[in-house]
Image (cartoon, helix red, strand yellow):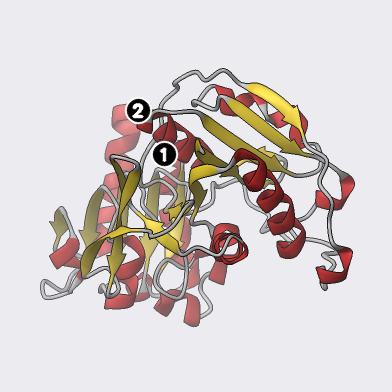
Amino acid sequence: MAGTLIYAEVQKGEIKKGAFEITSKAKEFGGEVAACIIGKGAEALAPQLAKYGADKIYVVDGPEFENYVPEAFVQAFVQVANTVQPTVILTSASAQGKDFTPAVAARLNVGAVSDCVELKKEGDKVIAKRPMYAGKAYALVEAVGTPQVISVRPNALGFKEIAGAGAVEKVAVNLDASKIKVQVKAVEVAATTEPDQTEAEIIVSGGRGMKGPENFKMLEDLAKLFGPTATTGASRAAVDAGWRAHSYQVGQTGKTVSPNLYIACGISGAIQHLAGMGTSKVIVAINKDPEAPIFTKADYGVVDDLFNVVPALIEEIKKIKG
């Protein structure tokens, strides 16, 4: 048995940041860290993983892997896993990861622990901390069986550069075409220069208190002042009203996020919303209702009309930035 095997997700021709997080964490655990990267042109991306601790990088590259097709990717990864024989498999709990991870675990006939926010090593086992009951409590979970299959919430761990050996090996996999029932013709990705909410370091979100779609421009302006790692989000109420596209929705029925800073503007804080952003490192709430539930989660709260606070905040940041 080897150490840890990472699944390095690729999207729009780049390795997702979550892959660097889990690779870096695996390096902290000790033992050999192997990574598997699948995709058309993936070989060119492989060396990046060495910077974050990958000792061996298995590359599955080919035109048939241009788009994510669950059965094809799972078959390929499981073949690599059977070669590596890891004790732990780590993946990201991204949109793709939530589809991919349980399928891999089922194929390996083991359980999967999903959407974890902390990992620690105890002997040969990894103990994972994961939210439950819509984020109202946490459970410490140990996956029974080998390998342990664990997915980690993006942005939950952070990462640092810890060089690994970085040996690259291209793998030829044999796909059972009879089991591949779906063909992906194209993937439509929202046209935006903002980072994905699940990977953003700062999120400025708006809710029902924004009063209309035109006022989200104010939140976009604030996010831009924080730099390229910041983006905007929205509550379900704002999305249901048609003010923002569903891709911006943060919450139980939207995206689960863990930024370093989450600014909630005019969001009351229904439990479904809190479940999606409760693991943010710092939460700032701006709401004129002092009884709004969002204040129970917030590290800093401003009880005032957001239309007074946000423009003033924008002006102050502009002054500081000169």
Give percent across and percent down for residue 278.
Answer: 27, 61
Mark 1 residue type: Leu
- Badge 1 vs badge 2, beta-carbon distance below 8 Å: yes
Q: Is residue 28 above or below residue 151?
A: above
Q: For residue 321, which numbered disc appears in the image?
A: 2
Front residue of this view, candidates 258 and 70:
70
Front residue of this view, candidates 248 and 103:
103
Disc 1 target residue: 225
Q: Is residue 40 above or below residue 46?
A: below
| 21 displayed left or right of 105 | left
Q: At x 61% / y 21%, what residue is drawn?
A: 166
Q: At x 53% / y 51%, what residue is drawn?
A: 196
**CA distance for labels 1 and 2:** 9 Å
| 154 displayed left or right of 319 | right
In the displayed orientation, state which residue is furthest to the front: 1
Q: At x 18% / y 63%, what residue is drawn?
A: 297
Q: Quadrant of residue 307?
A: bottom left
Give percent across and percent down for residue 6.
Answer: 55, 41
Q: Quadrant of residue 139?
A: bottom left
Mark 2 residue type: Lys
Q: State whether residue 82 appears in this view.
A: yes
Q: Residues within 10 Å of mark 2 (few under 14, many from 20)?
A: few
Q: Quadrant of residue 13?
A: top right
Q: For residue 167, which numbered disc appears in the image?
A: none
Across the whole image, how many numbered discs are drawn on residues? Answer: 2
Front residue of this view, candidates 66 and 260:
66
